[in-house]
Amino acid sequence: MAEFHILQIGSGSPRVRSTVSLVLDGDHCIVIDPGLAPSQHAISGPLKEQGFEVTDVTDVILSHHHPDHTVNVGMFPHARIHDHWATYHYDAWNSRSCEGFKVSPAVALWETPGHTPQDLSTLVETDSGLVVFTHLWFYQSGPPEDPFATDPAGVHAGRKRVLEVASLIVPGHGPAFVPDAVTPR
């Protein structure tokens, strides 16, 4: 089973930050969505508090290609980068579908288009249940309708799929939450 830590809790306007997370699974040290932050130290400092340097990160997962989720990807010089259609490592581009792709034994990717056509969600098996890192929600309260969605029906379909399995959701711009009856569908 993997464990996770939130390195930065995201926020929305006027200070836009992505929620940046660390997942540890065996030899895999994975960072999810290293996007906008007040400084790179806002990501590397909490990473160091967990006992890791940026050079220890083995994998980076990008939920989608908006700059607020990707702008600091270059901080991790040795990491494999995973997005919706490929894994990149140094100068190698390995095309593959993200659907069901296993980044590590306890970490898998799902296609969850809607916010953008290229969105993915990261599923992490932990001792406490399945944690899903996703941009299907910005925050616990939604918004009920994603104002930037390229495919609003896709957002709702992805939410339905995630809510069937998630014990905890880490949204794109807010703290983790336990889904309940009022979680936007």
Image (cartoon, rainbow, N blue to C red):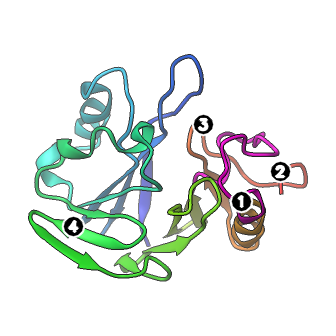
- Closest to the observer: 53 or 115? 115
Q: Which residues are magenta?
A: 134-154
Disc 1 to disc 3: CB gap under 8 Å: no
* 93 horizontally vs 164: left or right: left
Question: Disc number at residue 155?
Answer: 1
Label 4 – label 2 distance at C-alpha: 34 Å
Question: Disc number at residue 176?
Answer: none
Amino acid identity at mark 4: Tyr
Q: Which residue is mark 4?
A: 88
Q: Is residue 164 magenta?
A: no
How many residues crowd around disc 2 within 10 Å: few (fewer than 14), some, or many (20 or more)? some
Where in the figure is residue 131, as x and y percent of width and height?
57, 62
Mark sitting earlier along the chain (1/4):
4
Amino acid identity at mark 1: Val
Q: Residue at x 73, y 62 (%)?
A: 159
Mark sitting earlier along the chain (1/3):
1
Q: Which residue is mark 2?
A: 184
SS at badge 1: helix
Camera-near label (4 vs 2) is: 4
Q: Which residue is mark 3?
A: 174
On screen, residue 138 above or below 102: above
SS at badge 2: loop
Give the overall secondary structure of the magenta segment: loop
SS at badge 3: loop
Q: Is residue 136 magenta?
A: yes
Mark sitting earlier along the chain (2/1):
1
Amino acid identity at mark 3: Gly
Q: Residue at x 40, y 48 (%)?
A: 33
Q: Quadrant of residue 103?
A: bottom left
Mark sitting earlier along the chain (4/2):
4
Q: Is residue 27 visible?
A: no
Q: Is residue 183 visible?
A: yes
